[in-house]
Structures are given as structure tokens and as C-alpha cells.
Amino acid sequence: MHHTPPNLPLLRGGNYRKRMMKEIAKTYDHEAVEKELYTKWEKSGYFKPEINPKGKPYTIIMPPPNANGSLHVGHAVFVTLEDIMIRYARLQGKAALWLPGADHAGFETQSVFEKKLEKEGRSRFSIPRERLYDETLKFTLENKKVMEGQLRRLGASCDWDREKFTLDPDIVKIIYETFVKLYEDGLAYRDVRPVNWCTKHQTSLSELEVKYEERVDPLYYIKYGPLTLATVRPETKFGDTAVAVNPDDERYQKYIGTEIEIETVLGFAKIKVIADEMVDPEFGNGVVKITPAHDPNDFEVAKRHGLEIKEVIDQFGKMTDKAGPFAGLKILEARRQVAEAMEKKGLIEKIEPDYTHSVGKCYKCGTVIEPRILPQWFIAVNKKGIKTKKTLAKDALAAVNKGEAKFVTPKFAKIYKHWMTNIRDWNISRQIVWGIRLPVWYRKQKENPKSEIRNPKQNQNSKFKIQNSDIYVGVEPPQDIENWEQDTDVFDTWFSSGQWPFAALQAEETRNKKQSPNDFGRFYPTDVMETGWDIIFFWVARMIMLGLYETGKVPFKNIYLHGLVRDKDRQKMSKSKGNVIDPLGVANLYGADALRMALVFGTSAGNDAVISEEKIRGMRNFSNKIWNASRFVILRVTMGDLKTGQTGPIKISDLKIDQKNLTAADKKIIKNHTEIIKSVTAKLDKFQFSQAGEELYEYFWHNLCDIYIESSKAQLDDDKTKENTKKVLIKVLSESLILLHPFVPFVTEAVWSELRQICPELKESVVIADWPRV
RNA sequence: GCACGCAUAGCUCAGCCGGUUAGAGCACUGCAUUCACAUUGCAGAGGUCAACAGUUCAAAUCUGUUUGCGUGCACCA
């Protein structure tokens, strides 16, 4: 293996060609070059917007990777795309800022950490809150460090001095300020209502974190006295506080408003019959049991009719004392036993065995979600703020309709609009430790501690009422802290990352007054938000809502959403399938450039990317092609000087091409070259990275190498055309390196520093060169 | 149920605001090669652009229908 240091000074005089052959290796060795180049770039301050002080600002806020593991190939996609955009902007002379970050990623990280604990035979529920937090923090910070190294390894040209972490105290302060503002505006509120509860993770989840799956279950037709009703969940019958029929259903008119006597497995009981529109007379027998504690629709009915709420399933998914002999059983076992008991008593009229319905599951662990009635904090998305008069969803919809924030792929605008028009309030409380604790305190009350809401002695209807005078919400804790206790919940992590663009810039501005006196004013709104389409609702939509709310401006002007990375058979990558491509492994084996190029090639905005080792290898070959074409040019240009005795470096000012004496081949390549500059520029402006990359590949390999370089061999041997050919070669090559640089930053820089040895007037680095114009 | 997307070479995908022989990468076939690069070069094979109908002088590209695949959202006693 030949290792060629990037900036090796070429020796002059003597048998120059021989030395060249020695000093520029025959094959491009990325390993010898990439790490050193990155260090050099970072030290030189090339990645700071200040490198182009007069340039127009151009900003991308990096989607902060979750600091809970190594980077995967999906991260490599965003690094590649965003780095292309940023490097292109920088080459155009813009004050390009790519602000990096890391996300504590609340629930995500907590579940990763929980798995780790499980392996160690520990459980998060047996570790005190503070210690669990500290351990998770340590774990997160370690991962964050690894991740930062990996981003560098992939060539991410971001400004590390401006890096932010979602748990930085100044970031947290901004998150708190927003929450307090929302609270005072009436848009953040506490309510008791059914939430999606994961019995494994012991926390509630938002609508988006519940994945629905079709399932086939038996549908039991149960006798309720004179009535028969259909249910898939007989075990919840102990929580029934009414039976409902449709008000217009003629069959049941005589029962409405009465109490019927029913036989249950526990004996005889009386139950109210109510009429409610929610009952579909067509379904089953048109009779519904109302179990307010365990079904969101039933809860609404209970609210309308003032029904009692009886909890028969606890937070662990086990039956409570109210289930009598079934207490302590898990849901499915209870269902089996209850059904059996009912059958014995002849209470089951019939069973439809193949009833298809869908059940909600925790997106992380697949545990069936149980609705639970809990006091939680919500963000009102469809309500007008008392003070600001802003409406989150409506404003966010309008901004996209007006084109203030533009989706590069139109289909995502449709999806976004559809969601935004049907959006519901957002549950932001999570019953976990890892995250930003709610800045909410409740007044300590001797008789009614915080848990009062769960107290069964209370009048059930008071559950719907929360006394605001007993709640304190503020960035700072209350003065008489001894009279208050803080809410133990933390924010949904998307509540903090939803504020990321403005929070990161505002924090930077106050943190580093000298370096970044006007970062927020200068770089906000940002130019592009580039992320995966799978988090369009989780993140993009929330950023637009909160960004508009807090700053009055959209957080970004363009939205580029990339897809999933799949293997060559279009399969999703997963550890269990064993088809995972480790981006760092690939970078070490074939070079970061090869990985990047492979990720751009043949992919387009909004569509999934397909990658395979063969493809990466092909792109490694392309890096080598760039290396060798340059090797040829450097070699032959200086070799000519040996003949005439001129061995000194060629000056860039000497590279004025004699336009009158161009050969047909010269003309052709100049034409191609001009076209490629135009085309690549246009494509990059339109976010068509794949197109731009493919055209460059085609041009460089086939037009420049196969055709022109081949013709140049003869031209260089001819004294009449020799000088002009050298000039054409150097011009075309050096400009091609600039065009290629956003895609393959390392090899272009490695070659550029060699080229500078014969053209000292080239900029000191291709990173800060001038984008060619025609 | 509502909405959205996709069907182009053996494989994975571009192209699609209509206009010359439909492109790329990988794979395949034949030949070449000490002179930048075998991580190479040259030549080549391979597609009725899902089906049907329509608009047009002209359709892979626009419209409609059908079929197949996929995705999002909602409901579900």
C-alpha cells in the first residue's frame, strides 16, 4: 500500500517524471488522506460562515442525531445531502452555516438505555430517578462524542464551534420560555383524559407514536339482561357504567333511560341504558357497553352523560380489585377466563371468531396500547391564543399554502396539509425520567396531594376539573418552593426539537456574543430543512408550528425530505435481516467519498435510496478515476517542461487559452465543460443532487477522461498544440474538481493540493474556491 | 373508509411543465491493453416505457378507466 500524504511538496528538477511516478500513487488511497484533510479544514476555519464575510447568509440546521448510538446509513444520507448543499453554497461565496447538534431524544434514548439495563439484569424502575438520569446522561454524552467523530469522518462541513445539545441549559431555558408563553396564552393546558399508555414503558405516548395493526379476534355477543351486545374485550365489563343504544333505534326505545337488571359472572347487577349518537345501529345488535376508563369513545360518552369511571385495568395491564376473582390477571388471560366463566353461565349468545379490527401498539416495543385516564399536559393546536391570537395549526397550514415554506417534493405538501387540517391536540407529557422536566409545580395540599386526581374517594366528576390557582408554570421555580412540588413528567422530546432552529440560533447568539453577535437575525429563517420523510409530522410540522408561534417566521424556506435507505433488493435494512450497511465501515473500506457518491447516485427527493456494496465499489472506482486523471495531467504538464528545460511551476496567469488555435477536441471539451457548469449549477439550485452527480460522473469519466485526455496525448506530443493543450487540461480539470467537490470532498481536495504545486495561484483549498461561472 | 404515491433494460433507479435513434449504475457478451488508471479502455447485446381508451401533427411524458404493488390518515362495540 502506498500512502501519499495530501500536501506533499513535489521535488523540482532532476528526473521529474520519475519522482512524480513515485510520489503520486497509482491508486487513490483514501485512508491516507481523509482524516488529515478534515482536521486541516476544521483548523483553517473553512466551515465557518465567517470565511465568506461578505457573502449572503445560507443556513442549514442539522437535524440533531439522537445521541444514543452510532451513526447508521440513514445519517449518512443526511450528511451527504446537506453537505452537498452547504459546500455548494460556500463555493458560491455565501456565508454558509451548517449548525450541528445532538438530541437527547427522550423516549428513544430511554428505551435504548433500558435495553442496555435489561442486558445487565437491571430495570429502570428499580433505580432512583436522579441516578437513572445521571447514568443516562453519561451514556448519552459518550455516544454524542462518538457521533461527532463519525460526522467528521463522513466529511460533514459544519461549524463545530456553534454545536448545540438539546439539554444545554440555555436551550432548555428557551424551551421553558416557549412553554410558559403557550400556557399564558391558553394553548398549553392540563387535562384529564384518555391517553395512549404503553404498559411496558410505563408512559403515555402521542397519537403519532401509536402504530395500528390489523388483528383477527373473536367478537363476543354477550347477554346483558334483555339486551345482547358485541364486544372484543369482555374482560373490561367490570368497568361498564352504562349500556348505550342509538337514540333513533326503534328496537330499544323502551329501555332508554331505565335501569336494566343483568346477570354477570359476579352475580346480578343493575345498569343504566342511555341513548347516544355514537352508537351505530348497524353494528352488532346496535348495543354498546360503556367502559369509560378503557375506551376513548366511551370516555366521551361518559362525559356527556355524567357517568362514573371505573378503572379495572391498572398501569401494568393487570386487572384491578374491581375485577373480583380476576384481579391480578393480565389482560389476555383475564379475557380468556372471563369469557369462559360467562360461557359456563350461559351469558354468551354467540362468538364470531374472525372479527378483523385494528389495535394500537407502541411503536417501540409493539405492546398493545391501553387507553388510560390521566392528568397530562397538552398543546392546543386548533385554538386561538388568548394573548397572541395565533392558532398553531392554522398558521402552519397558511405558511405552506402561501409558499413561505416550500416542500421540494409536492406530494409531501399534500400529506402535510391533510394532516394539518385534521390535527388534534398534542400530548406532551411523558412519564419517563430522561428528558426536560416540565416547569410546572402543584401546590402541596394536605388533603389533596397531587395524586388527588387518582383518588377514588373523590367525586368522580371532579376529575374533569383542575384548579388553575394550584398550578404554577414558570421558567424559574416558585418563590415559596416549600409549598410546591414539581411535576415529575418530562416533555415529549419533539416539543424541544420542534423549537430547534430558532433555539439553536438564539442560544448561539447569546452564548458567543463576539463570534455570533447577530446569528439569529442573520441566519433565521434558515434556507433548508433536510430530513427523513418519516418524521414529517413528528418534527417538520411541529417546527413550523412552534417556529411561527415563537418567531413569527417559518423556521426554514425549503423542505427537502429524503427516504429510507434500502438494499439492492429494495429491502429495508435491519439488524435481524443482516443487510445493514455500516457507513463508517464503508468509509474505512472504500472511502467516505465513495459512500457519499453511492448515496446520491440514482436517488431523488422523496424517494427511497438504494445502495449496495457493488454500487459503492463503483463509486470508489470513480474516486480513483479522478485521482488518476489528475495524476496524468500533473505528470504530463510538468513533463513537457523537462524537454524545454523549464521545470518551474506553471503560473495560473499563464493559463490563458489561445482561443484562435483550438483543435476540434479542445473545442469539444470546452463546449462540454461549459454545458456541465450550467447544468450542474441549475440542478443544484433545484435540489436535483442525483441528476447533478450523475451528469458530473458521466462528463468527467467519459467526456474528459475517455475522449479529451485521450486526444490530448497526441496534442501534447505536437509542439504546435502542446502549450494550449496543457492550459485547457488544467482549466477544465481544476474547474471540474470544484464542481465535484460538494459530492466527493476528499479526493477533490487531495488532488487539488497536488495541482496547486504546478498552479500556485489556485486557491489554497478547493473548499473555498470560486464556483465556476459561464 | 379517506387521501397519496409507484408501475421504464436481468437487478436498482433516473427521465415525465409532450418533440430527434428512451438513459445511468451494477450484471452480461466479445475484443484490447507494458506508454494516468485492470479500481482500465473499445465495441456490443438487452426495453411494444403495466393494460386499455382519449387529447394532439406528435405521448414514457397530459386526461380517464382498469390491474398490480406500496404508503399515510381515520374508524373499529
Image: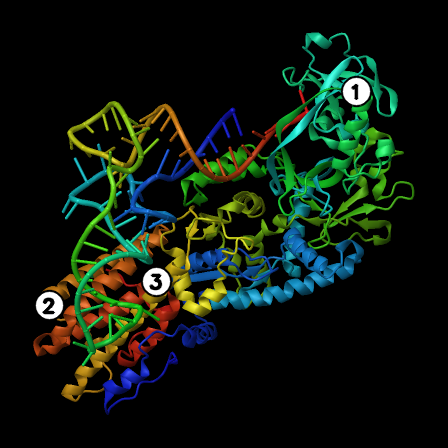
Please, what secondary structure does the residue beneath circle 1 have?
Answer: loop
Name the kind of residue labelled 2 in the image. Leu
Please, what secondary structure does the residue beneath circle 2 have?
Answer: loop
Q: Residues within 10 Å of mark 3 (few under 14, many from 20)?
A: some
Name the kind of residue labelled 3 in the image. Gly
Quadrant of the image for the N terminus of chain A?
A: bottom left
Residue A312 spot, x, y in % from top left: 81, 33
Which residue appears farthest toward the bottom when viewing the image?
Answer: A14
Q: Could one spot residue A155 in this view of the protein?
A: no
> What is the chain identity of the residue bearing mark 1?
A
Residue A519 spot, x, y in % from top left: 51, 60
Can marks 2 and 1 be said to lie on one chain? yes
Residue A680 spot, x, y in % from top left: 30, 56
Please, what secondary structure does the residue beneath circle 3 have?
Answer: helix
**Looking at the image, which residue is at 70% across and 45% down?**
A429
- How far is mark 2 from mark 1, CA to CA? 98 Å
